[in-house]
Amino acid sequence: MNLYETLESIGLSKGESKVYVALLKLGSVPVYKLKEETQLHRTTIYDFLEKLLNKGLISYVIKGNVKFYNATTTNKLLEFIKEKEEQVKDILPQINKLSQSKQEEIRVEVFKGVEGVKTILNDILRVAKDYVIFGIDEIMFKEKMGTFMDHFFRKEKQLGFKERILTSDAASYVYEYDTVNYRYLSRESFNPTPTYVYGSNVAILIWDPFTVIKIENKALADSYTKYFEILWRVAKRKPKSAILKKARSMKLAKRL
């Protein structure tokens, strides 16, 4: 970056830079000398001189009714730069506020094991009154979480929460609680990766190793919710009784 480009980068126009550098080279001179040096029009030079005077980068003296212009000390240029820096600092809070309103942060957390999943379930009770779940296999979930889910559903009922779950139409077990509403997708449409969408969060459950990845981002949560609603509209309302009957048969077969 040359001298002119540097001066332009700190806020001087191309013409101002040209006149300022000419004064640094020539010292104290009248306008006609600047015209010879810069090859700029006289009236244009006056305009640039006025702007440089306002910035405090030049001064003038009058000799025999003629104005002689000269560049101020280079320290004044540093003062000018610092002044610009202070001006930027003053408006930084406004800039940050505007930036934050447009760019939402994405926060990712990983929770491992049964206790990690409990953390997410308790977070749901804290954050969202209504939420949705994709791709859950309730038998696997019950095996992993045990009696904790009974406690969770009781708490959910106390708080007046409602959850909607999309599971497979081949499911052999679902929880029977008033707070839960199931619908069923065909095997072709069913994605066996459990995904919770609540508030501004998306929590993806991995069975092995038993892990939850929580992503906090409103735009992502909104996108998942829209996708859920599309699937919810086409999913079947398969009666729970048919599934539970199948589940009881499985239990009986195990006993035999």
Image (tube, rainbow, N blue to C red):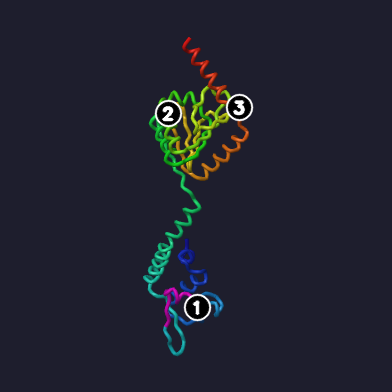
Q: Quick one: which residue is furthest to the right in this view?
A: 234
Element type where label 3 sits in the image: loop
- The foreground one among 12 and 195 is 195
Q: Residues within 10 Å of mark 2 (few under 14, many from 20)?
A: some
Residue 124 x/y as whole percent:
44, 38
Which residue is denoted by mark 3 in the rendering? 186
Q: Residues within 10 Å of mark 3 (few under 14, many from 20)?
A: few
Callout in the foreground (3, 2):
2
Callout in the foreground (1, 2):
2
Q: Amino acid at mark 2?
A: Asp
Q: Earlier in the sequence, mark 3 or mark 1?
A: 1
Q: Earlier in the sequence, mark 3 or mark 2?
A: 2
Numbered circle sitting on residue 34:
1
Q: Amino acid at mark 1?
A: Leu
Residue at image point 41% right, 66% down: 81
Type of secondary structure dominating the magenta stretch: helix
Numbered circle sitting on residue 150:
2
Residue at image point 46% right, 38% down: 160
Numbered circle sitting on residue 215:
none
Residue extent of the magenta highlight: 48-60
Residue at image point 56% right, 26% down: 168
